[in-house]
Image (spheres, rainbow, N blue to C red):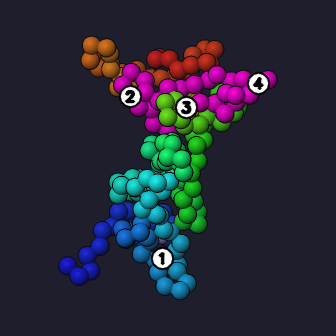
Amino acid sequence: MENETKIVGRCPLCGGKVVKTCKGYRCENNTGEAPKCGLFINGVIGNRKMADHEIAELLSQRRIMLDGFASKEWKSFPTVLVLNADGSVSMESRVAVCPRCGGEIRVGTKAFNCSNYRQEDAKCEFVIWRNICGHLLTEKEVHEICENGITTEEIELYGDDGHIYRKRLGLSPDKLKVIKV
Ligand SMILES: [Zn+2]
Ligand SMILES: [Zn+2]
């Protein structure tokens, strides 16, 4: 049992194993004076404890959208963690380009909003609710709606009485909201 380690995934930079350590997640090739790889992911990011399966997704997809980060004032916020080419991790609120005005669509606590929401002269009210009929939209789905106008796959949705139905989600003709197609 001496050399037992917990491997959470593969390093996307060098292909090495990423092991869990006391302070975070480190590539096996990130050791010594001149490490071959710079990958190290803190175990706590934005006052939020990371789970092993979240790190596994960040390693395989290079990004993951998560809730529950906290500012210095302990205000909770969602963000997308991005694994950079140098092995560092940064936060990005942008998930897509606004199909109405070309602004940035950013992830918020309840909705994906356009960055021009507060623009006085060119106010854009485009919004995609994060929870649509019991389904929490993924970053990929938001991207598809903004980029292609519709999701690739049908999505499992829930009626008031609990019945399950499947629809694709797409842009309304006026590009103001998301509708079931
Ligand atoms: Zn590595
Ligand atoms: Zn917009």
- Residue 127 placed where, x, y %? 57, 25
Locate residue 51 relative to residue 178 in the image: left or right: left
Q: Residue at x 54, y 59 (%)?
A: 89
Mark toward the start of the polypeptide (2 vs 1): 1
Q: Residue at x 46, y 63 (%)?
A: 42
Gap in angstroms between the C-alphas marked 2 and 1? 39 Å
Q: Secondary structure at mark 3?
A: strand
Query: Which is nearer the eye, 146 or 104?
Result: 104
Q: Which residue is mark 4?
A: 120
Mark 4 or mark 3, whichever is nearer to me:
4
Mark 4 neighbour class, 10 Å CA radius: few under 14, some 14 to 19, many 20 or more: few
Gap in angstroms between the C-alphas marked 2 and 3? 14 Å
What amino acid is at disc 4? Glu
What is the magenta range? 113-139
Q: Which residue is mark 3?
A: 112
In the image, the residue with mark 1 has its CB under 8 Å from the nearest atom of ligand 1: yes
Q: Which residue is mark 2?
A: 135
Query: Which is nearer the eye, 21 or 85?
Result: 21
